[in-house]
Image (tube, grey):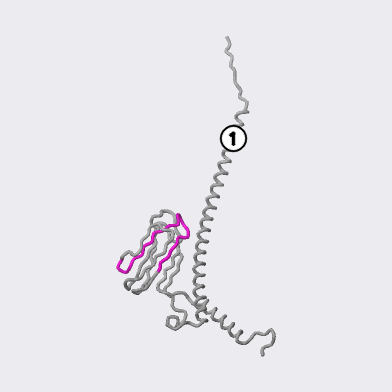
Amino acid sequence: MPRPGSVPRWAAAAGRWGCRLLALLLLVPGPGGASEITFELPDNAKQCFYEDIAQGTKCTLEFQVITGGHYDVDCRLEDPDGKVLYKEMKKQYDSFTFTASKNGTYKFCFSNEFSTFTHKTVYFDFQVGEDPPLFPSENRVSALTQMESACVSIHEALKSVIDYQTHFRLREAQGRSRAEDLNTRVAYWSVGEALILLVVSIGQVFLLKSFFSDKRTTITRVGS
């Protein structure tokens, strides 16, 4: 019989196993075919990436311009035969999902060739295939146990949290870039106003001084 205030053994064991399962969920990696990169794209430049994809694989390309100019970029996606699957001009952000029609190397490029003096910072997430099942029995007809169902729910919730964190980090970086750009413009404008005010003040001083200066006239007499 347990003593008053003590924790039963089964509850302590369940708590230990729950902590272990949660730690395993936190260590579960994302899909093996996912690529998440942030890179700088100089002006008048083009950057391409390549990915080997098997036929029938579902893929998703998502990108967003974080900093630079009007926050826009050209994006183009081609299959192994060079057929254009996706093409957009001067997009700030977008997402495109497709299913590979054949085996081979797919190419997607980001272009900033329309810009002459501003470079961009671009983020993209290229997901290839579906997430592997958390449990081997997840794809079977038999129902999952209550613990397995809870683990799957926690796993899906953690993936949603990661997606939201990435989204808000991108928005925070974009907002910080806009704020820094605005701060620079305000600083230059303030310096320009100060210089204009200084020039106007000096001009007014010389103008007022000219009003109060004595004008001496010289009279010359012509003798007879």
Residue at screen point 60% across, 30% down:
210
Is 110 displayed left or right of 218 in the figure?
A: left
Magenta range? 60-82
Q: Residues within 10 Å of mark 1 (few under 14, many from 20)?
A: few
Q: Residue at x 52, y 58 (%)?
A: 175
Q: Position of residue 222 (x, y in %)?
A: 57, 13
Residue 176: image location, x then y, percent: 53, 58
Q: Nearer the viewer, residue 16 or 72?
A: 16
- Report the quarter where the N terminus lies: bottom right
3 drawn magenta: no
Look at the image and say whether residue 62 sits in the magenta stretch: yes
Residue 46 lies in what quarter of the image? bottom left
Q: Is residue 53 above or below residue 172?
A: below
Percent position of residue 9, x then y: 62, 87
Q: Is residue 4 left or right of residue 172?
A: right
**Residue bearing mark 1:** 204
Q: Secondary structure at mark 1?
A: helix
Quarter containing the C terminus:
top right
